[in-house]
Structures are given as structure tokens and as C-alpha cells.
Image (cartoon, rainbow, N blue to C red):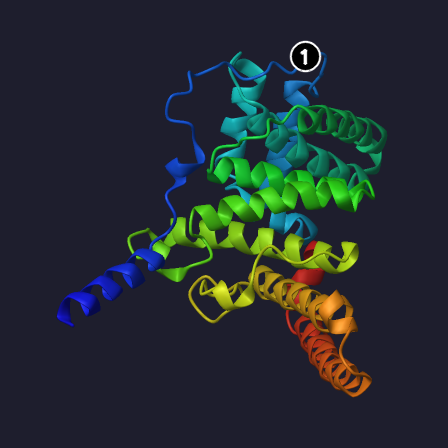
Amino acid sequence: MRERIDALRTMVEAMKKQPAAHEMTYPNAKPIRPVAIEGCELPPIEKTLQALKLAKSHKQVALAWVFDLFSMDNLPETCLTVYMADDYNPVQFITVNVALHYLFWAFGNLLPDRKEEYLGFSRNCGVNIETALASLPLHLPASDDVIVALCLGAFYAIELGKPSLAWTLSSKASELCQSLGYHRITTFDHESPEETRHKQFLFWVAYILDKSLSLRLGRSSTIQDYDVTTPEPGSSGPDKTPTTAFFGLWVLGSRLGGQIYELLYCPEAIAQPEPTRRSRAQRLAHKLGELDALTHEASVRPPSLAAHM
């Protein structure tokens, strides 16, 4: 009996551990050079440095999620790698171009004297993004950089009005997050607070995309809420900011979207008796009302947010 209990304990402990990222690779595959992305022009480097300097001194709340996806301290270095090196990969190229696309778009609309020039750079980066996304391979390594690029690509696909493409990218991001164990709190037992915050943020971005697109496309979510133990953003703690509070509401809204599909629109839900569906709809409507109240409270409480819009 003792041996059986020990064996069961071993199984439980193994399930708690994050899946091994190396299982996503082929052990005997020879390294190959990344596919070159040819014919894509980046904005002049001096204009990019100008936009990065503006981003540091004039942070926009509308772009706060972009800054949180990757540290602003790392973005200039990544930009220089793409501009200067010959061996950058498509993931870096996508990340830099999505970041610049949104930066030039934001500041182009804020600075009238630079509007035409900056919006032109933004459109040019959009062409680069689409070219690089089209060249992504089937197998991608499980790493933070890849997750960032996939999530940014998914947001860009949503901007283009292509939810199915966004789903393809976000589903891969979700898969990689779960392969790395970012949905489990035990994964971060030996991580620094900064690393923990960043990796958990990556997971919740993938979660938002997954749940929102699930309802939009009528597809089952790739992330099950009963499997998630990572704390939600916006919880009380030293890292709580107005931005994380709003991001937490975004998570709640996305989760509710996933529940609406699961409880009202999936084939199993549609087959339920009318009283059951009516009861579910009433519960979900109540939750929507609660979310609306929380959103209103958050929008009127932090006056500093309006100053940055």
C-alpha cells in the first residue's frame, strides 16, 4: 500500500511540473539558418530612434499593453539587432515591426506636423508584418520571444479584420504558454518577481485573445479555466497599477466571452432544454452587469489615465 501511495504522489508531483519545452523540438534535426525576409524596408533608423525616445517620454495608455508584452528597455536593443545584424529571425522582425507600427500610428495621430510621415511608416511596417507572418514555419520553439511575436501578430490580424488568422496565431501562442507551464503558479516557484510578472502577463495576453476569438468564431477555447492557477492581473500587490487594473478587467471580459460561447452557443449548450438556457443567459447577463459596473468604477477612479490618453 505504501508503494502505491508513493507512486501516486510521484504522478501528482509530475503533473504539477511544467511540461518540458525540449519536447517541442526534434533531437536529431540539424540547425538551419532562418529564412531571409527580403524586399522589406524598415523606416529610417533615425526616425525609429526618434519614435522610441517619444515612447519613453510620452507613454500612451492605449499602448501600455504593447510595452508590457516586452520590456521597453529591451526594445531598442531588439530594433538595433534587426537593423544592423544579418542573422535576425522572423520572430524578432515581427516583434519590431508590430511595435513600430503601433508607435508610429499613435504618435502620427498625436503630432500633426509628423502625421503624414509617421502614418506612412506605420503602413510600411504593416506590409513587413504580413510578409513575415506569411513566412513563419510550422514548428516554433517554446520561448517568450515567439509568444510575444505571435500575440502581436494576432492583434495585428484582428486590426485587419481577419479573426481566423488571428485564431491561428493566438492558438499557437496559447499552446506555447501551456507547454512552458505559464498557466500554473507552481512554474514560478524559483523565478524572480520580474520574470514571474512578465511570463504571467504573456499568458494572460494569450488568454484574452483565445477567449475573445472563441466567441467571435464559435470555436472551443484552447485554455480551460479549471486548469489555470496563475493569479490574474490587477490583483492587489506591489505590481498593481492603473494599467494592470484595466488589463484585469480585459481578462474578466474575455473569460465571460468564453463562458457565453460554452454555456449558450456551443453544440452541447444549444441542445439543452429552454429553461436551462434561459437560466444560463440570466446568470451571464448578471455577470455582464457586474463587469460593466467594475469598468465604470475603474474609468472614473484613476484621473491620471485620462491625462495620458
Q: Compared to 30, does 52 lie above or below?
A: below
Q: Is residue 221 visible?
A: yes
Disc 1 crowd rating (10 Å Cα; few below 14, some 14-19, many 20+) is few
Residue occupying image coordinates x 24% and y 65%: 9
Q: Nearer the viewer, residue 217 or 298?
A: 217
Q: Secondary structure at mark 1?
A: loop
Place residue 282 in its image quadrant: bottom right
Q: Is residue 28 left or right of residue 138?
A: left
Q: Compared to 38, does 276 lie above or below?
A: below
Residue occupying image coordinates x 64% and y 45%: 170
> Mark 1: which amino acid?
Glu
Can you say which quadrant of the picture contains the C terminus? Answer: bottom right
Residue 94 appears at what percent x and percent y?
A: 63, 30
Q: Nearer the viewer, residue 90 or 268?
A: 268
Q: Is residue 57 visible?
A: no
Q: Compared to 165, does 97 lie above or below?
A: above
Residue of label 1? 38
Q: Compared to 10, does 36 lie above or below?
A: above
Residue 148 appears at what percent x and percent y?
A: 56, 40
Residue occupying image coordinates x 54% and y 14%: 84
